[in-house]
Image (cartoon, rainbow, N blue to C red):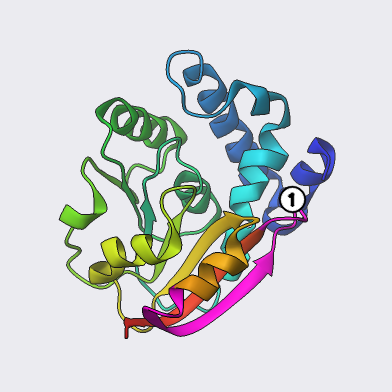
Amino acid sequence: MTEAEARLWVRERYGVSRETQLATFGSILTTEAEHQNLIARSTLESLWSRHLTDSAQLVPLSEGAPQGAWLDVGSGAGLPGLVAALLTDRVVVLVEPRAKRVLFLRDAAERLGIADRVTVIGSKVESFRPALPVAVVSARAVAELSALMLSTVHCTDLSTVWLLPKGRSAQSEVDAARAKWQGRFHVEPSITQPDSGIVVATQIGAR
């Protein structure tokens, strides 16, 4: 997917105003990447296809989720958490243990005008206790599937939708996770990287 195609994908689904907000976030991210290692420098020229639209494609996959918060684990650069906040009206909780990235995420949410719906938690997800089970869990390049579910399942219930980009390892991680976790697993092909997959899981519980 080219940069133009990636940006058009967002525009056609979410309109020019939200595309513009994503572009603003992209500028904030690019500037901050000069000061801390948020994303690989080699991907800056493909920001839309590698990061913004790659994150945005999770939003349609969340449409079957109940009402409630979107939890993004190990948010780092705000991918996909801040993208989800820009493209939906959900409350979004970003959990990120690294202090410098916590400051970046809070500042970005303020500058994007979504700080009223975005909460940044400066800790590991194991220490986070939401008041209610979250509706959606996302995590990008955080941990192997079974380990991620073990660290995060206390924030969820059986109605939670898990959206987990896993690259080429998606199916093998699902196969391994089935030994420890029961639920419904599906691997959705990525629209931005055809050889990559997104694990979509529901009704997750330990065996």
99 or 63: nearer the viewer: 99
Q: What stretch is highlighted in magenta?
A: 177-196
142 or 112: nearer the viewer: 142
96 or 12: nearer the viewer: 96
What residue appears at the point 51 percent right and 64 percent down from the top-left corner? 163
* Residue wearing tag 1: 192
107 or 168: nearer the viewer: 168
Q: Is residue 195 magenta?
A: yes
Counting from the top left corner in percent of width and height, residue 191 is at 75, 57
Q: Is residue 62 visible?
A: no
Q: In which quarter of the image is the N terminus?
A: top right
Q: Can residue 140 be seen in this view?
A: yes
What residue appears at the point 62 percent right and 46 percent down from the top-left corner? 18
Decide: is 90 above or below 6.
below
* Outermost top residue: 34
What residue appears at the point 38 percent right and 80 percent down from the top-left corner? 181
User: In the visual, does 189 lie left or right of 126?
Assistant: right
Q: Does the magenta stretch include residue 51?
A: no
Counting from the top left corner in percent of width and height, residue 65 is at 47, 76
Query: To which quarter of the image does residue 207 belong?
Result: bottom left
User: In the visual, does 205 lie left or right of 188?
Assistant: left
Q: What residue type is labelled 1?
A: Thr
What residue appears at the point 62 percent right and 40 percent down from the top-left corner? 51
* Dot 1 crowding, Cα within 10 Å, few <14, some 14–19, many 20+: many
Decide: is 44 above or below 163.
above
Q: How many marks?
A: 1
Query: To which quarter of the image does residue 23 belong?
Result: top right
Counting from the top left corner in percent of width and height, residue 22 is at 60, 39
**Mark 1 residue element:** loop
User: In the visual, does 198 lie left or right of 109?
Assistant: right
Counting from the top left corner in percent of width and height, residue 119 is at 28, 47
User: In the visual, does 112 lie left or right of 186?
Assistant: left
